[in-house]
Amino acid sequence: MTVVDMVWPDQSNHHGTLFGGAALSMLDRMAFIMGSKVLRGSVVTAAVGQLNFAAPAPAGHLVECQAVVIRQGRRSVTVETRLLAEDLLSGTRTLCLSGEFVMVRQADDGAPPSSAVDVEERQADSGHFASATVAEIVFPGHANHRSLLHGGPAMAWMAKAGFVAATRQVRRTVVMAASEKLDFKAPAHVGEVVEVLARVTRVGNRSVQVQTEMWAESPTTGARRQCTTSQLVFVAID
């Protein structure tokens, strides 16, 4: 499984690179999502090992988090994770951090699954067009008074995924110029995993159109529903 994020200045240290704690948080989030998909229950981080900080990730770079299950028991999985930095303008990629996370399903969370759950890669068939996947966990701070994902964070996550896809497509500095259509179809609840899929659908001389879809998934049941779709337009400014 692979998802992307961006390194913003508020996540950076005084050297202008991604703070180590923020990098670990990104990988822990990735391990939680993978552990939830496999164990189908309420999972927690039990241990972290074999951490290797190989290179810094500068502010303004994309970071790609990768995860694969390397060991699985009845109530635990060991997830191997990697964080790579990508210069969106040149496409240069660097391995920054790797580590192993042991995720455990809580004992009061019902019977374990009878067999391993296949973790499917849900990446769009984009052909020669660029794509990106952003995954988040809906925390109380993202929600309104009804414990539903607030529209603001949802739009921010979709804009981030669209920005990555558009920049990967043209390898130029882009800004969002328009949102042609935005449809809220279903809510996402606190505790659910949100996955945003972004795919470039059209490229002009200076503009890029990106189709985004936001899906919510229950960590315990695996049930998925489409929450929001949008058409975003980005324009190259250099």
Image (cartoon, rainbow, N blue to C red):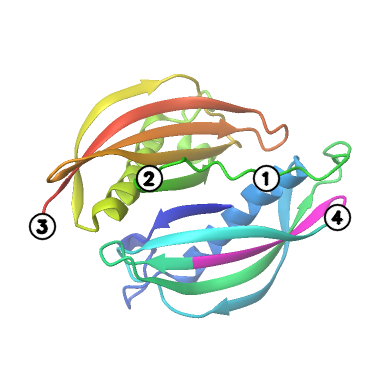
Q: Residues within 10 Å of mark 3 (few under 14, many from 20)?
A: few
Q: Secondary structure at mark 4?
A: loop
Q: In this rendering, which labeled residue sits more in front, label 4 or label 3?
A: 3
Task: Give the mark nearest the N terminus, 1 or 4.
Answer: 4
Amino acid under label 3?
Asp
Mark 3 and mark 2 lie on one chain; the one further toward the N terminus is: 2
Please state which of residues 33 and 88 is positioned toward the viewer in this rendering: 88
Residue pictured at 24% horizontal, 58% vertical: 171
Real-space Cα separation, disc 2 to disc 1, in angstroms: 21 Å
Disc 3 versus disc 2: distance between alpha carbons?
A: 21 Å
For residue 62, side relative to residue 111 (left or right): left
> Which residue does the numbered mark 3 point to in the structure image?
238
Magenta span main SS: strand
According to the picture, the residue beneath numbered tag 2 turns out to be: 161
- Identify which residue, 194 or 181, lies in the foreground: 181
Q: CA distance from mark 1 to mark 4?
A: 16 Å
